[in-house]
């Protein structure tokens, strides 16, 4: 009995030792790279005038020694007062010995002063060389030489499930180290169309922004940028900007003082199972073209609404979110090969990548008297010329006035939508729309192109009987 117990203990100890032996040791990585990670503190100027929602305004031209008196007189202590200066903390890392530093755009945005604190306790004033809001990348420069630098890695070599490590200043705690694994790659977030984020479960909190994400090879593979949270703190979802995207932005800022992005001139969406069926595809994949911008590179290349882009310049496109970052990093005026699916057939096109315009056009919608309800349960109306201009609808389309219970409601069609096409057939007017709808087949997925709040989107539905 004793021997069995001893053997069991030894077996447990052996298994425990093997389990611990397989866990990564980050000590050497931190020793080798910690010196190149910096703490970034910024000062932002607040407006000179402060006013509570129910208080009078503080005069601007009073003597400084009387400011506190007037502040208490008009507002009272703690009643909506905003200090003249606010401070924030973030992280960054040194990429060159002569003082270039990478961080997030949101860490230094609107900063009147930027102070970089090194691990050896030195504090240096930094100059903002430039920043890019779209990718949330900023490049700083300090006046120093022979600084420690990080080694830049390749996000393409990063594997899902691989261990990664972050160093930063969460909540002001300098040189804090956290670790986890890569949860996913190529994530597309609502506010990051040109960034294929690296998702991790590394603990990231306020103050970590702008800090490096290291692979087990001791190389920086990303910049910690965002978290998804219901509480404001870490909840297991962290997102980093791939370092190749960040370095591309930094090089453009250094050379040209601004960032230029490739532009295709299309609006796209994911291909759902029903849409794939309606377009004759064996499975959902690619980026479905919902709109082709007039005069843009895509139109010149012959791309059409309803085309599905499955490959761009050698890059396989599985989801629509994968396309914008690839196009954005393609040099302007460079030709790229496109592989598309058009009405079930595979085709190849060549497109000359254009320059991304500075601002997207915001569209609005109007109203019209409604007409009769058709078999989809929709009441639609023709658009006047004034409404076409207001909604920026070019040639075709009818306005949805009411949506009854049934097929259209289940598909997600809403009042105010403009129906542009049904199963690749452009909708000229109400009469044309009703003719098309009357001939739609039963028990087959149908694709409908609508415009909602200025943006085109494909929806799919099926008529049961």
Image: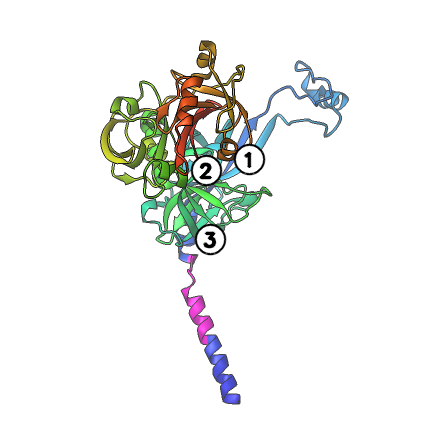
Distance CA(mark 1)–CA(mark 2) = 58 Å
Distance CA(mark 3)–CA(mark 1) = 24 Å
Element carrying mark 1: strand
In the image, residue 326 lies at what x, y percent?
Answer: 32, 35
Query: Dot 2 corresponds to which residue?
Result: 464
Residue 154 visible in the picture? no
Element carrying mark 2: loop
For discs 1 and 2, the disc positioned in front in the rendered view: 2
Rendered image: mark on residue 328 = none
Side of 255 where 454 appears, left or right = right
Q: Does the magenta stretch include residue 17?
A: yes
Residue 346 position by quadrant: top left
Q: Does the magenta stretch include residue 110?
A: no
Query: Dot 1 corresponds to which residue?
Result: 88
Q: Circle 3: is it few (<14), some (14-19), or many (20+) Cα within 10 Å?
A: some
| Residue 153 against residue 112 in the figure, above or below | below
Of the pair 329 and 207, the residue shown nearer to us:
329
Query: Dot 3 corresponds to which residue?
Result: 179
Side of 433 where 251 appears, left or right = left
Residue 49 visible in the picture? yes
In the image, residue 375 lies at what x, y percent?
Answer: 48, 28
Helix, strand or loop: magenta stretch = helix
Distance CA(mark 2)–CA(mark 3) = 52 Å
In the image, residue 285 lies at what x, y percent?
Answer: 35, 41
Query: Upstream in the sequence, badge 2 or badge 3?
Result: 3
The span shown in magenta is 14-27
Query: Upstream in the sequence, badge 3 or badge 1?
Result: 1
Element carrying mark 3: strand
For discs 3 and 1, the disc positioned in front in the rendered view: 3
Of the pair 284 and 86, the residue shown nearer to us:
284
| Applied colour scheme | rainbow
For discs 2 and 3, the disc positioned in front in the rendered view: 2
């Amino acid at each position: 009995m004793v021997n069995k117990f001893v053997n069991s203990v030894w077996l447990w100890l052996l298994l425990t030792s093997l389990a611990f032996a397989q866990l990564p040791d980050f000590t050497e990585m931190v020793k080798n790279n910690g010196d190149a990670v910096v703490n970034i503190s910024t000062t932002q100027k607040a407006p000179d005038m402060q006013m509570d929602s129910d208080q009078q305004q503080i005069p601007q031209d009073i003597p400084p020694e009387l400011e506190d008196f007037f502040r208490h007189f008009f507002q009272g202590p703690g009643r909506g007062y905003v200090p003249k200066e606010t401070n924030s903390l973030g992280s960054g890392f040194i990429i060159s010995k002569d003082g270039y530093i990478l961080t997030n755009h949101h860490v230094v945005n609107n900063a009147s002063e930027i102070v970089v604190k090194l691990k050896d306790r030195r504090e240096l004033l930094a100059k903002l060389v430039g920043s890019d809001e779209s990718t949330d990348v900023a490049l700083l420069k300090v006046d120093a030489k022979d600084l420690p630098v990080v080694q830049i890695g390749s996000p393409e070599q990063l594997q899902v499930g691989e261990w990664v490590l972050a160093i930063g200043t969460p909540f002001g705690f300098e040189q804090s180290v956290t670790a986890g694994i890569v949860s996913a790659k190529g994530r597309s977030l609502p506010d990051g169309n040109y960034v294929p984020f690296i998702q991790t479960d590394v603990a990231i909190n306020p103050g970590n922004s702008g800090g490096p994400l290291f692979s087990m090879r001791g190389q920086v593979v990303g910049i910690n940028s965002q978290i998804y949270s219901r509480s404001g703190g870490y909840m297991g979802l962290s997102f980093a900007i791939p370092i190749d995207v960040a370095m591309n932005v930094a090089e453009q800022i250094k050379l040209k003082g601004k960032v230029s992005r490739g532009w295709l001139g299309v609006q796209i969406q994911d291909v759902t199972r029903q849409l794939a069926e309606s377009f004759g595809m064996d499975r959902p994949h690619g980026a479905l073209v919902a709109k082709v911008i007039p005069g843009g590179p895509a139109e010149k290349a012959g791309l059409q609404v309803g085309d599905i882009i499955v490959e761009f310049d050698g890059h396989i496109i599985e989801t629509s979110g994968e396309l914008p970052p690839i196009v954005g990093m393609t040099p302007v005026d460079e030709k790229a090969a496109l592989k598309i699916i058009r009405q079930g057939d595979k085709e190849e096109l060549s497109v000359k990548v254009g320059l991304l315009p500075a601002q997207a056009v915001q569209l609005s919608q109007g109203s019209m008297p409604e007409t009769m309800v058709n078999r989809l349960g929709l009441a639609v109306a023709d658009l006047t010329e004034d409404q076409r201009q207001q909604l920026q609808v070019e040639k075709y389309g009818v306005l949805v006035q009411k949506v009854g219970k049934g097929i259209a409601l289940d598909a997600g069609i809403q009042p105010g939508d403009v129906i542009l096409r049904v199963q690749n057939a452009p909708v000229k007017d109400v009469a044309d729309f009703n003719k098309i709808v009357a001939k739609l087949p039963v028990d087959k997925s149908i694709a409908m192109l609508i415009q909602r709040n200025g943006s085109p989107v494909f929806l799919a539905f099926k008529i049961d009987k």
